[in-house]
Amino acid sequence: MGVGLIMTNSRGGMISLGAEIVFLVIVASIRPRNAERITRVERARAAMLRAGLAFGLVVVLIGGVIAIGGSDSFSRLLGTPSAADPTTGRAHFWNVTLDIIKAHPFVGTGLGAFGVVYTRYDSHNGLLRLEQAHNDYLQILSDGGIIGAALGWLLW
């Protein structure tokens, strides 16, 4: 699942995966108060083992991504935004999504219709096709309108 998460090319997902690995190392090091006393050397060995396992997990994840052919996934985390990367213009996507919401405020455009409707309202000639608004709240409002958002909020 970690390889799949990295292959999604989500910066937030990769940061979350790293934080989860650090969290697991910390949680694994917590000992109950009534546990038997261990020496300082044994604690150091245990800490080194946990750190080594975490490092091994990271190496296996990176190796899995490279084996599948997704080495380009790492360039997004380390590189700078480029015009070829459609996620660099989220502010523009959100402005277009707000235009869609203004045009269809009550019932929205329909579930799954964002990719088609976006090209109609895009001020960049409609050449870029998006399937999502890159913002869950705006996506819900554009797909279901105020009524769909209210129903979603009630069911949540």
Image (spheres, rainbow, N blue to C red):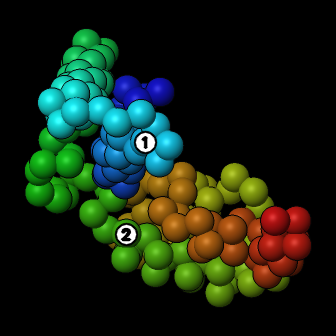
Q: Circle 1 — which element?
A: loop
- Residue located 50% across and 43% down the image: 34
Number of residues whose C-alpha sits closer than 10 Å to that of mark 1, classed few (under 14), some (14–19) or many (20 or more): few
Q: Quadrant of residue 155?
A: bottom right
Residue 130 is left or right of residue 12, and the answer is right
Q: Position of residue 119 (x, y in %)?
A: 51, 62
Which mark, by number, is residue 31?
Answer: 1
The image's mark for residue 115 is: none
Label placed on residue 90: 2
Seen from the viewer's position, the closer of residues 28 and 89 is 28
**What residue is at 74 percent from the left and 84 percent from the top?**
105
Q: Residues within 10 Å of mark 2 (few under 14, many from 20)?
A: few
**Between disc 1 and disc 2, whose residue precedes?**
1
Q: Amino acid at mark 1?
A: Arg
Report whether 18 appears left or right of 130: left
Residue 30 in which image quadrant: top left
Q: Position of residue 25 (x, y in %)?
A: 34, 39
Answer whether labels 1 and 2 touch (C-beta < 8 Å).
no
Q: Is residue 58 visible?
A: no
For the residues labelled 1 and 2, the Cα–Cα distance comes to: 45 Å
